Amino acid sequence: MKINKVTLYSHSLDEMLNFYVDELGFELRAQTNASFEITIGDSVLEVKDYHPQEKPYYHFAINIPTNLFNSAKEWAKSKVELLKEDGEDEVYFTLSDAHAFYFSDPSGNIVEFISRYAVSPKSPSKAFSVQESLCISEINFTTDKVGFIGSELNSLGLPVRKDEAISEGRLNFIGQHEAGSFLLLGPRKRRWIFSDRVSETFPLSLVIDDKLIISLNREGEMKVESAETNLG
């Protein structure tokens, strides 16, 4: 599974634009009065203005080259305050064979930079910049309908990592382990690591493999469309 595009919502659109483009240096692809798009490696992140009273926040991850983790961490520390868990500002995931660090953005999103040693390439560069970002590799899909939506995703050819069974009480990594990209299907009120925030349902959409547009609404209901049809 490859995540081509993710569309999120924000109550702080101007601050988000300044943060990602001016402060972090991501390339601005498009901009309107109500949205903007940036390039993150092979993926696109679109942020849209959000007017309801809720203040949406999400968790998403960005894959980075395996030889630039320490450089990326130092780069990030020069721009943001890294989040900590049990006093540590990074983590090693044994199952994924990956190192990661986290920070928050003006919308309160929990942003993860992760080096997946088994699947991500090395870079010829010796120092990290945002242009070294590989792709968006995780986005949360938070809903009270975990079992039902998990079955629907399975029927679309999107299995749980390592063919595990869907669990309604925990985070399910939807996607092939060897691809290194996942839709994080899980219930509300689950605390995100490296944060005091808990998972909540907010609208979002993503394009997968240039074929499917998968959307989630405010009620946690999923809609699936053909990306090829929408592209005309």
Image: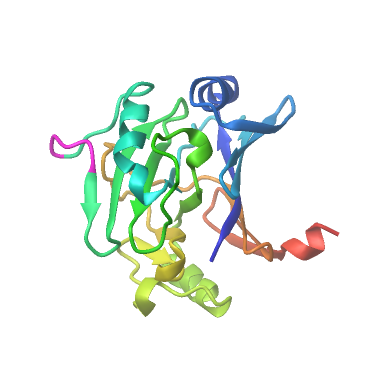
Residue at the spot x=30%, y=46% of the render? 100
Nearest the eye: 20 or 151: 20
Q: Quadrant of the C terminus?
A: bottom right
In front here: 151 or 16?
Answer: 16
Q: Quadrant of residue 144?
A: bottom left
Q: Looking at this rendering, what residue extends furthest in the right direction?
A: 232
Q: Residue at x 40, y 34 (%)?
A: 127
Q: Main secondary structure of the magenta part?
A: loop
Taking the magenta stretch, the answer to whether it contains residue 95 is no
Q: Residue at 36% of width from left, 76% of height from top?
A: 162
Q: Is residue 80 visible?
A: yes
Task: Answer left or right for 152 relative to 75.
Answer: right
Residue 197 visible (yes or no): no
Query: x, y (%) of residue 73?
Result: 31, 34
Q: Is residue 88 magenta?
A: yes
Q: Is residue 70 left or right of residue 25?
A: left
Foreground pick, 33 / 40? 40
Q: Residue at x 36, y 42 (%)?
A: 68
Q: Which residues are magenta?
A: 86-90
